[in-house]
Each structure stands twice: as structure tokens, then as C-alpha cells.
Image (cartoon, rainbow, N blue to C red):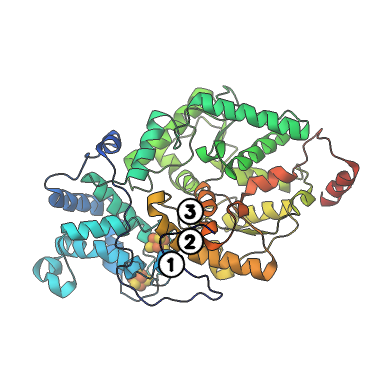
Amino acid sequence: MAKADFNVPELEQYPEIPALEPNTMGHSSPFLSKPEFQEPLGFPGELMEGWEEKAIAKMGELLDKYRSLRVYLDVCVKCGSCTDKCHYYLGTKDPKNMPVGRQDLMRKVYRRHFTLAGKLFPKLVGAEDLTRELLDDWYSYFHQCSQCRRCSVFCPYGIDTAEISMAAREIMDSIGMGQKYCNEIIGKVYKVGNNLGLPGPALEDTLEGLEEDVEDETGVAVKYPLDQEGADILLVTPSADFFAEPHVDGLIGYGKVFHEAGVSWTLSSYASEAANFGMFIGSYENMRRVSQRIRKAALDLGVKRIVFGECGHAWRVAYSFLNTLAGPWDFLDPNYPVPQHICEFTYDLIRAGKLRFDKSQNDDMVLTYHDSCNVARASRMGDKPGGQFDIPRAIIKATCNQFYDMDEETIRERTFCCGGGGGLLTDDLMELRVKGAKPRVEALNNVMQEKGVTHLAAICAICKSQFSKVLPFYGMEMDQIVSVHQLVSNTIVLTGQKIDEDEDEEVDEAA
Ligand code: SF4
Ligand code: SF4
């Protein structure tokens, strides 16, 4: 069990709504960004003179630009439906982590400056000035929201706290109070091409190593091409896929699927990152700059299609905004969706009977599946409603004999965030990450006890990294989290692959 210098919550069999413990997480704030990370993104280096006026002016600008923000701040009736729906409240008991409590941190400033009642009778309507104390609360609690949108599913008005958090972070960045983790990472994308700062030669080395490993293991020369001009498909994947388990096992799987499909594909060293942290900080301009790299790579390489690897928020940005951010994509093949998810790609091949699997290769695992929040509540897959839930499960079932879902209140559109999304996957927020993971780990623990589940599959780089880190705090193993395409990789039978006779019979049965 990993050691913690804070209380790790006890897992319960039935979720309990905790009694309030005000300000238990008031001390939790991520490291502030330094000028060297602020300025390349177009933000002031540090908290500027006259920040309050500037913040209110920025809020006014956002209220004019995003009608939804004004509506969300106006329409809450304090019905309480959202109060027990946020994993950070359930894990920390802090009422400012109730979605409505978090919203109110901004709502009181909105009322003070943008409503008549708040200007004339502030105390009567709970309106407040943006004092330094309140700004510190903003910094703390708007970095305790993973922008997962679970609360919006339960709000009768559909109020989306994620958008309020994004706006708050945008306002704070505009006055020089940015978050180090996100802003430093965005800077690395501009400088090197990816979040991890991996230069082209390091990527090339990794990919060559993968080619050798796969050929040793299967006897088949599967290629992992980089910067190959004229390839049909550009794969844009999170840089974690080049780097660490279980992510890299997913990348191995994508390559095997492309090989078996007989398509030409390539990665790009220039656009070697699917993640787009511009969304987490609410900065459309930075989100656009990151996305434009994909456009440039696609044009330079002359590809016909773009496929995204396993990354939750990257898929949200790609699915929902890529056309606005970096389109039009009229130079790509119109016969395919722009963009396409690797799960859609693999699923289409499975449906067409073009892939063979030896499911017994995954018999050492009993699987469950974690719906990553950005995929579940901010995107779709395939051509049917619910495809974002059904397609990954169909791939798991095609590659594994043993699969059980977690409790239905905790999956699909009601899924709980892993606790590390929304730009919070940083060690300076470890207490928050561990406590915020509680509802998901609780549901996992229950299905482990009841069904003998051993592993949790996911299609999000942040979820995979978060679970590797936090599961040991709950007495579980870091390698219980696996990539969906790792399951594909373990079981796919490549044309020409040498397998023994017993295995051959199992493959025939599975097919
Ligand atoms: S968006 Fe997610 S993290 Fe943020 S308040 Fe709602 S439930 Fe909590
Ligand atoms: S569920 Fe919606 S309306 Fe009700 S308190 Fe929460 S945010 Fe307000």
C-alpha cells in the first residue's frame, strides 16, 4: 500500500453521502505558473497591478462571448440535485467541492458586477467583490474540478460546472495567476511538439524498439512509421503512448491493427501529441494553436485520414471542436469521418470479420471498463447514440472471455472521473487525486469482490496514469489498469504469425 501524508478514504460497499466538513481542502492549490511558462502562452507573467478590475473586465468579455456562461450563472435554483454528484465532494467532504458550491464562487462575483440587484443590495443577493481571499479560493477550488461534467447530467437545468471552471481559469490566466502544470505542458508542445518534451530522435528510437519487439514476439514485421510522407493515415496519439506502460502497449496494438488492415499510416514528430491542455485552461486561442499543429502535419505529410489514439480529452477536443479550431478538412478523404477514433477503426474491422483474435491470451485477466468522462459525456463514437460506450466494450468482449461492468450508477453517462482529469494530474495535487478517485475505486473494488475482476481497461491517457498512481493508495496494484488496445495487442493473430497447434484451434473457435 502506498504511503500517504493525508487520510486515504475508506472504501465503502454502498456509496454514502458524507457529512459536510467545511474547508477541508482549502489548503489544496497547485503550484503557480512562473513567468517563463506564462508568457509564451500570451499571459501576464505574474499577478498584475490592478488585477481585480482586469478580472472583472475579462469576466464581462466571457459573459458576452459565451451565452452559456451567463445562463449557467443566472438559472441555478439551488435545488441541490448536484450536491452529492461530484467525486471531489464525495472524496473530500468539502462543501466548496459540491458543484453548486464551486459555481457560487464565481456566481457571487457575477451578481456583484453584472446584476442590478447585486450592484444595489449585494448582501441581500449573496453578491461579493473579488477580494484577494476569494481569488485564492478560486485558484484552489477551480483546480479541484476535473471538468468531467458529471454534475451537469443530474442538474435539471443542465448547468455545466466544467464551463464555469474553464472560464475561471481563463480569467485567472489573464491576470497572471496561471497553473504551472498545464501552462508548462502547453509550452512544451509549442517548443518540442508534445507534452512530455520528447524530441524527434527519441520518438524514432522508441518506435524502432517497438518494431524489434513485435517482430521478435510474432515473427511479423509490423512497422511503426514516423514522418512518412504520402501515408494514408496520420495517427495522433497522446505522447504517453511513446513512453510508459500501459500506454505503450496500446500503441503496439494500434500498429498491429493498422498492419492487419493493410493500410499505410504514420505518426508525426511535429504533431506528436493528441492531448490539448488548452481546453483545461479554458483558452480557445491556445487550444487553436495546439490543434493547428495537426493540420500542418496532415498537410505536410499529405495524408488522407486522421485517426486519434486513446486519449479522453483529446477525443473531446477532436470530436467536438477540431473543425472549428483547425478546419476545413476538405483536403482529406471525405469517405471517412474527420477525425476518427482508433476504437472506431478497430471496431469496423471486427464487424467486417477482418481481425482474428486468440481470446485465451487474455485469460489471466477478468476485465471491467472505465468510461472516461470526456469520452462519455462530451463526445460520441460510431453512427449510433451510445457508441462511445458500446464500441470500446465490444472491442473488449471481442478480445477477452471475462468481462463484467461496474455498478450501473457509475458507468456510461454516469461514470465517475478517475480523479486526475482536467489538468489536475500533477503530484502537487496528490491528496485531491487520491480522494477524488474514491467513488471510482469503490465501484471497482465492489466488482473485484463480487465478480473476481482483476483489471480495469480504459481509453484515456490521463485515466491510465492516474490509476497507476492512485490504486496503490487503496491497496491495489498499479498494473491493474490496462489499455483497450493492449487487450487487442495481446490477442490479435497477425497474418503469417507463428502459433502452435493448440492455440490455432482456439483462434478458430474464437473466430
Ligand atoms: S464538472 Fe465534475 S469535477 Fe467539476 S464540479 Fe462537476 S462533477 Fe465535480
Ligand atoms: S442541480 Fe443545477 S439548479 Fe440544482 S443546485 Fe445544482 S446547479 Fe443549481
Residue drawn at the location 40% of the way across and 36% of the way down: 290
Query: Measured from the top left, where is residue 159 in percent x and y?
Result: 36, 64
Q: Which residue is mark 1?
A: 91
Label 1 element class: helix
Please name which of the two marks, 1 or 3, marks the residue nearer to the observer: 1
Camera-side residue of 321 and 134: 134
Residue 285 falls in image quadrant: top left
Q: CA distance from mark 3 to mark 2?
A: 16 Å
Vertical side of 353 occupied by 228: above or below: above
Q: Is residue 396 above or below residue 210?
A: below
Give how far across and how far down residue 455 sits, in percent: 64, 57
- Of discs 3 and 2, which sits in the foreground? 2
Q: Amino acid at mark 1?
A: Gly
> Which residue is located at x 46 percent, y 31 percent?
295
Identified by mark 3, the residue type is Asn
Give the SS element for disc 3: helix
Residue on which the image places disc 3: 374
**Quadrant the N terminus occupies:** bottom right
Residue 146 sits above or below residue 243 on the image: below
Q: Residues within 10 Å of mark 3 (few under 14, many from 20)?
A: many
Residue 436 in the image, given as x and y percentages of width and height: 44, 62
- Asked if marks 1 and 2 touch (Cβ < 8 Å), the reply is yes
Ligand 2's image quarter is bottom left
Q: Earlier in the sequence, mark 1 or mark 2?
A: 1
* N-term-proximal mark, 3 vs 2: 3
Q: Is residue 403 left or right of residue 329?
A: right
- The answer for how far apart the CA atoms under marks 1 and 2 are is 7 Å
Q: Which disc is residue 437 wearing?
A: 2
Find out if the beta carbon at label 3 lies less than 8 Å from the nearest ligand 1 atom: no
